[in-house]
Image: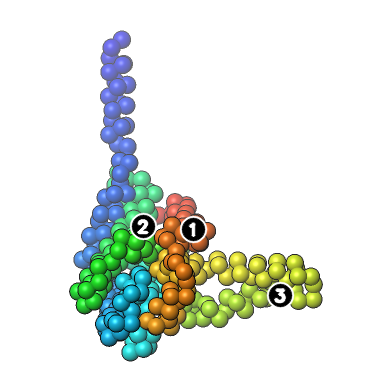
């Protein structure tokens, strides 16, 4: 009677040995991160984004040094390096360029995540290995987030270090916390575009076509989104001027909520509240004088928790959009047929 029990035990042990490991996505993510760090794409993006970040910082730090007697008593002066623009640099700010170029980084690290494996014939080999199918898409996404977080974190540290050396300003704990929250929000915004690019790599077979669609979407929203979205909102939710005040308020509120669906708008709202304690707009042409005067007009500045509470709905909605985009790519990849 002992022999059948031993046989069943050996069969169960063999099945457990054949079972795919639960941490397969970690292996995929580590391999994806290593491939990104060794690629020319990473170096090019690092140089482009780094130059775009250092360019406005250099000129605004020069303006702060020149206006030291006037701005010496200003609060949160270290944040001006990120949110104030210099006339010598066309009033461009670091946060504005970050919002413009971060989608480019997210798309660049995700548009060929799946389709290039399919074209090279390595996707079937990955699926033949002892890992789950969902580990592939999970690992690709985590690897992309890791390399984006590393890139943005290094650039923020570089800008902060250069600003402290040039200006001799030591940021307060409140300012450091605001920069960290801004960095986390920027990574989240990039994660949305990474999930969008991952979806394109699953749906579109060709990597070149996926890149064209992804970068075309980014360019369209970046340069024409601010013009087209209000027009679409007015068509869908026209202002009811002939009705009562309640009807007009309802239509304008619905139009404003429709504009808030855009991830770019959500990100701008978060940056505006977090990076400027005076809650004045910081994404447009804001010079040093406007930044300081906006603070002097207020009896006190907002604390970090108050700023986060102002935009907590935007943060939650941006997380939800990112999760929904990734979930769509996840489900479609699991339902696709993979042939050798």
CB under 8 Å between callouts 3 and 1?
no
> What mark, if any, has residue 141 been given in the picture?
2
Q: Quadrant of the N terminus?
A: top left
Q: CA distance from mark 2 to mark 3?
A: 42 Å
Q: Is residue 156 visible?
A: yes
Q: Which of the two labelled residues, at mark 3 and mark 1, occupies the earlier sequence position?
A: 3
Q: Pick out the residue farthest to the bottom.
A: 88
Q: Work out whether 148 lies above or below 46.
A: above
- Nearer-the-camera pick, 201 or 308: 308
Other residues around mark 2 within 10 Å, as few (<14) / some (14–19) / many (≥20): many
Eye-nearest disc, 1 or 2: 1
Horizontal and vertical percent position of residue 20? 32, 40
> What mark, if any, has residue 217 been given in the picture?
none
The quarter of the displayed image where residue 114 is located: bottom left
Q: CA distance from mark 3 to mark 1?
A: 29 Å
Circle 3 sits on which residue?
A: 239
Q: Work out whether 315 lies above or below 262.
A: above
Horizontal and vertical percent position of residue 250? 70, 66
- Nearer-the-camera pick, 247 or 60: 60
Q: Quadrant of the C terminus?
A: bottom left
Eye-nearest disc, 3 or 1: 1
In this image, 332 relative to 207: left or right? right
The quarter of the displayed image where residue 15 is located: top left
- Nearer-the-camera pick, 64 or 319: 64
Q: Residue at x 43, y 79 (%)?
A: 293
Horizontal and vertical percent position of residue 185? 40, 63
> What mark, if any, has residue 309 been given in the picture?
1
- As helix, strand or loop, the secondary structure at mark 2 comes to helix
The number of callouts visible is 3
- As helix, strand or loop, the secondary structure at mark 1 comes to helix
């Amino acid at each position: 009677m002992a022999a059948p029990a031993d046989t069943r035990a050996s069969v169960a042990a063999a099945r457990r040995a054949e079972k795919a490991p639960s941490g397969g996505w970690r292996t995929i993510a580590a391999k994806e991160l290593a491939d990104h760090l060794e690629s020319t794409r990473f170096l090019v993006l690092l140089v482009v984004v780094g130059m775009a970040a250092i360019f406005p910082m250099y000129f605004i730090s020069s303006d702060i040094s020149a206006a030291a007697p006037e701005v010496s008593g200003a609060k949160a002066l270290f944040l001006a390096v990120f949110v104030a623009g210099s006339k010598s640099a066309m009033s461009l700010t670091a946060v504005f360029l970050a919002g413009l170029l971060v989608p480019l980084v997210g798309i660049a690290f995700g548009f060929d995540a799946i389709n290039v494996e399919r074209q090279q014939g390595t996707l079937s080999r990955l699926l033949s290995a002892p890992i789950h199918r969902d580990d592939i898409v999970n690992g690709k996404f985590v690897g992309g987030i890791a390399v984006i977080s590393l890139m943005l974190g290094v650039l923020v540290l570089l800008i902060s270090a250069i600003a402290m050396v040039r200006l001799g300003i030591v940021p307060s704990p409140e300012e450091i916390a605001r920069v960290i929250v801004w960095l986390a929000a920027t990574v989240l915004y990039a994660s949305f575009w990474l999930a969008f690019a991952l979806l394109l790599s699953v749906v579109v077979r060709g990597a070149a076509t996926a890149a064209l669609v992804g970068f075309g979407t980014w360019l369209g929203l970046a340069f024409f989104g601010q013009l087209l979205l209000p027009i679409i909102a007015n068509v869908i939710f026209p202002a009811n001027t002939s009705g009562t005040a309640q009807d007009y308020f309802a239509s304008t509120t619905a139009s404003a909520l429709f504009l808030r669906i855009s991830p770019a708008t959500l990100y701008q709202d978060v940056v505006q509240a977090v990076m400027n304690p005076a809650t004045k707009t910081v994404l447009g042409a804001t010079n040093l004088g406007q930044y300081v005067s906006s603070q002097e007009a207020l009896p006190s500045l907002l604390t970090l928790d108050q700023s986060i509470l102002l935009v907590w709905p935007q943060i939650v909605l941006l997380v939800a959009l990112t999760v929904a985009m990734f979930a769509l790519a996840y489900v479609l990849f699991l339902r696709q047929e993979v042939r050798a």
